[in-house]
Amino acid sequence: MPQQPVQPHGFGYPSPPPPPARKRGVAFWLLIGVLILVGLVFVSCTAFALGGGGRSATSSEAASSTSAGPTSANPTSSSPTASDPVRETAAVACIDVIDHVSKAVDIVSADDPSASEATSLAATISADLDKAPLELVDDLTAVSDTLTKLASGETINGTEVVEPGTRLVDACEAAYGVPSKEATEPADEPDDEPTEEPRKETKYDKLSDEQQEAYGAAQSYLDSSGFSKDGLIDQLSSEYGSDFAKKDAKKAVDALDVDWNKQAVRAAKSYRESGHFSTNGLIEQLESDYGSQFTHSEAVYGAKHSR
């Protein structure tokens, strides 16, 4: 079938063609880019400001809560820390209080209490009142007043100090966790090695090796019989004895601690056991150069005490 001719539009004229698309210039796109960039910067700044403000508020709240200090006067709270100077001061005061109260108990418990010590300690405890926590004031005052009475010569009952003192100690330990001053002080550490007094040098220590040998030999002779000083030196230096040099024998005998009178008695008894002697005869035998060589006074003593 043949195509039908297109009817003209409107009044018999054809419809106008559509307007051509308008091209955007470079300047337009640059303007759009700048606007987007400004928007991003604005959003970022706003977000940063909001985040910093939140952190500042948190820091302020933390600082406020730290500076506020303890919110309760509960005496059973934990022990003081470096961030709690008020409780630190109270704890230090408690240590002094416990120490002073312990001394007060000792004073009133003594058989003869010292008035001067009581007066001095009462003044010290009165000074404690200025720095002690309020809950300790009443008992501290009671202890101080009792010591003042004692100092003035009044008769007191020991419980007037012991009872408030016990309450003070319990309160300090419960409130601030502090023991007495003695318990907080470190104990004295023992020395690594006990110090010994230096041994005094004896006569024996000053002897030479040879003289010490002679000293030992002299003691052996004295253990077996009674000798005079000169007789012992001769025995040590004799070639029929120990054959020490005369000077070494003399040094050794001089170092001995011997009662020569008692040696004369021993020698006299030995003579009497072996024979019969008159007193004068025994004295001559004891002091003879061919006998025991005692001095005259030693020989007399030996003879008289040998019976």
Image (cartoon, rainbow, N blue to C red):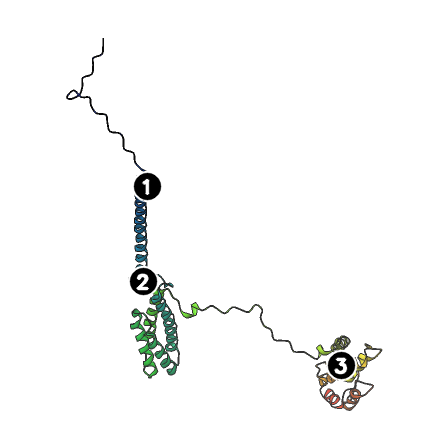
Cα distance in 3D space between marks 1 and 2: 55 Å
Check disc 2 and report the residue beneath it.
67
Q: Residue furthest top?
A: 1
Q: Nearer the viewer, residue 294 or 273?
A: 294
Cα distance in 3D space between marks 3 and 2: 88 Å
Q: Residue furthest right?
A: 239
Check disc 1 and report the residue beneath it.
30
Residue at image point 37% right, 80% down: 120
Residue at image point 33% right, 64% down: 175
Q: Do the residues under discs 3 and 2 have CB atoms within 8 angstroms?
A: no
Q: Quadrant of the N terminus?
A: top left
Check disc 3 and report the residue beneath it.
251
Q: Is residue 228 visible?
A: no
Q: Secondary structure at mark 3?
A: helix
Q: Do the residues under discs 1 and 2 have CB atoms within 8 angstroms?
A: no
Q: Secondary structure at mark 1?
A: helix
Badge 1: residue crowd in 10 Å (few <14, some 14–19, many ≥20): few
Q: Amino acid under label 2?
A: Ser
| Front: mark 1 or 2 | 1
- Horizontal placement of 212 versus 75: left or right? right
Q: Is residue 141 visible?
A: yes
- Horizontal placement of 289 versus 63: left or right? right
Cα distance in 3D space between marks 3 and 1: 126 Å
Q: Do the residues under discs 3 and 1 have CB atoms within 8 angstroms?
A: no
